[in-house]
Amino acid sequence: MSKHSGETSAAELELAGLQGGAVKLGEPELATLAARLSGTMLRAGEDGWDNAVALWNGMAARQPALVLSPHTARDIATVLAFAREHQLRLSIKGGGHNIAGTCIAERGVMLDMSHWREITVDARAQLAHVGAGCLLKDVDHATQQHGLATVLGFVSEVGVAGLTLGGGLGYLTRRFGWTVDNLEEVEIVTADGALRTANRDENADLFWALRGGGGNFGVVTRLTFRLHPVGPAVYGGLIAWPFARADEILARYRALTSEAPPELSVWLMLFRAPPAPFVPAAWHGERICAMAVCYSGDLQRTEQVLAPIRALGEPIFDLLQERPYTELQSYLDCTEPKGNHYYWKTEYTEELSDALLSTWRDLAAECPIPEAELGILHLAGAHNQRDADDGAVGNRNARFALGALGMWEPHEPRAAEFRQWVRDAWGRFRPFSCGNYVNFQTADEGEERIRESYGENLARLSAVKQSYDPENIFRSNRNIRGAGS
Ligand SMILES: Cc1cc2nc3c(=O)[nH]c(=O)nc-3n(C[C@H](O)[C@H](O)[C@H](O)COP(=O)(O)OP(=O)(O)OC[C@H]3O[C@@H](n4cnc5c(N)ncnc54)[C@H](O)[C@@H]3O)c2cc1C
C-alpha cells in the first residue's frame, strides 16, 4: 500500500496526490506496476528521461515523478487503475507543445503517448487513422503521399492529439473548418479503464465533448480524420514591407480578407526582422509588416488571387512561390525553437475595426521585446457555417485570431518586464474579443478563460465530464470541472 505521510526512505518515491499533498510509494509497489506493464517506466536520471520530460515552453518546465510509456490500451488501463488506487496526479503527454505545460503535473505520473506514431491512410475513403502520439508532420507527410490533407496547424512539431482535442486551426480552416470538424472517430481509454470508440453514432455524447473539450475525458489512443484533396503543390511563403507602411498594409489586409476565396489564408505579422539570410542586412532588427500566405486552390489562378498582395509593391523580401504543401506546413518551425521561454495572449475577434487596427499598429510600434509578434490570422469560412453547438469547440463567430506572442531566452534579464508588456498589450486588445482558443491559454489564465472559450457549450461539457470522469482523474489540462461548477 502507498503511504500518505511520514518520512521518505531511500527506496521510496514521493508523488503528488490527486487531492494535493504527497503520496509515498515503496519499491515493491513500483516494481509491481512495472511488472504489469508491457511498456516502460522511467525515473529521474534514467536513460531517456530528459527527452521524455522536455517541453517546448521552457517557462513551463516541471518534473514528474514517473514517466510511463504504455504500449497497449491495457497498459493505459493499468496505469489509470494504479493512479486511482493510490490517488496520484496524472498527466498525458502528446507533442509537448502546450504553452501552459499541461502535459506534466509536478511530481505526478506522466503517461507518455509520444511513441504511438502509427498512421494508416485509406485514400479511397479519404480517411486517416492516426496514433495519438503523432506530430503534425507525421500526418501531413503520410496523407500528402495521396494528395490529401486534413486541417492541421502551422508548426509541424506540435502534437496531433493536443491540437485536435482543443479544436485545431491552420491554413485549411477557411476551407474545411476547425480540425475537429474533420474528426470522424476517436478511440479512448476512459477513467474506468474501458477502451471506447466515440463517433457520431457510438458514445455520441463523448464524441461531442472530445471535439474541443481537451484532455478532460480520457487517454486518446487513435484519431480518425476526414481528408480532402490538397496540393501536393500550393503557393505560399512569406512577404514583407517596412513598418512605416503599417497603416496602408493593415487596411489592405482588411480589404483582402473581406474578399479572399477560402483557398487563400493569410496571417499578418508585425515583428522585427530576424538576421536571416533572406532578409537584407539593412533590415536586420528593424520593424516590418509581413504576411505568411497559403493559397491551396487552382494554381492557374495564383496571380489573380494574390494580386491584392502583390499590388502593395516594393517588398523587403518576397518568398512567395509554388512549393510542396508539406514544406509550407513546416515553414515556420524555425521561428519557435524548443526550450525558449514563451508568453502569449490571444483572442478571437469578429471584425477588424479601425480602432482595432490602430491599436495593433501602436502595440507593434511600442513593443520592447526583440523577438515578439503581433499577429492577425484570418479564419473566416467553413467553421462559421456550423451551429454553435456543433461539437464542444464553439467560437463559431470567430473570423480572426489575434495574438501578442512574446519569446525570449531562458536567462533573459528583462523577462518580467517583457511578460508584463504582453499582459498590458492584452488589456488593450481584449475589448475586441469575441472568444478565445483554449489551446493558446497560458498557465496563468484561470477558469473564467475556460468559460469564455466554451460559452454556452460549457454546461453540456460539464455533464459529459461528470459521467465519464466523476473523480476528475484527468485534471492536468484546461480543466472543465472547476470552470463548469
Ligand atoms: C509553436 C506552436 C504552434 C502552434 N500552432 C498551432 C496551430 O497552428 N493551430 C492550433 O490549433 N494550435 C496550435 N498550437 C497550440 C497547440 O494546439 C496546443 O499547444 C496543443 O495543446 C499542443 O498539443 P501537444 O500534444 O503538442 O501538447 P502536449 O503538451 O503534449 O499536450 C497538451 C494537452 O493535450 C492533452 N493530450 C495530449 N495527448 C493526449 C492524449 N493522447 N489523450 C488525451 N489528452 C491528450 C492533454 O490534456 C495535454 O495536457 C501551437 C502551439 C505551439 C507551441
Image: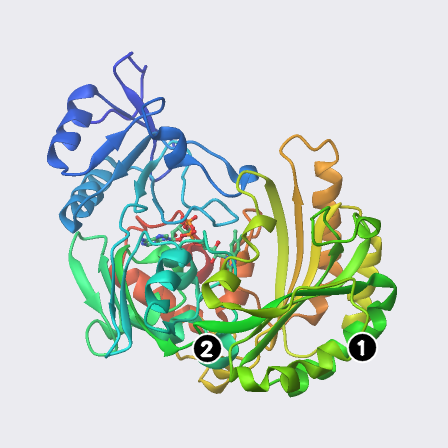
Residue 353 appears in the picture as rendered: no
Q: Ligand 1 falls in which quarter?
A: bottom left
Residue 98 location in percent, x, y? Answer: 48, 50
Q: Nearer the viewer, residue 212 or 136?
A: 136
Mark 1 falls on what kind of element? helix
From the viewer's perspective, is 387 left or right of 334?
left
Pick whichever, 98 or 2, lies toward us: 98
Q: Which residue is mark 2?
A: 177
Callout 2 secondary element = loop
Task: Please provide percent x and percent y for residue 56.
Answer: 50, 43
**Quadrant location, the N terminus:** top left
Q: Residue at x 42, y 54 (%)?
A: 479
Name the kind of residue labelled 1 in the image.
Asp
Q: Nearer the viewer, residue 470 or 317?
A: 317
Quarter of image, res 253: bottom right
Residue 318: quarter of image: bottom right
Which sits in the foreground, 292 or 178? Answer: 292
Q: Which residue is mark 1?
A: 354
* Disc 2 CB within 8 Å of nearest ligand 1 atom: no
Asked if residue 178 is positioned above or below residue 472 in the image, the reply reads below
Q: Where does the image place residue 404, in percent across and percent down from the top left?
A: 68, 57
Mark 1 surroundings: few (<14), some (14-19) or many (≥20) residues within 10 A: few
Mark found first going from the N terminus, 2 or 1? 2
Question: Is residue 98 visible to us here?
Answer: yes
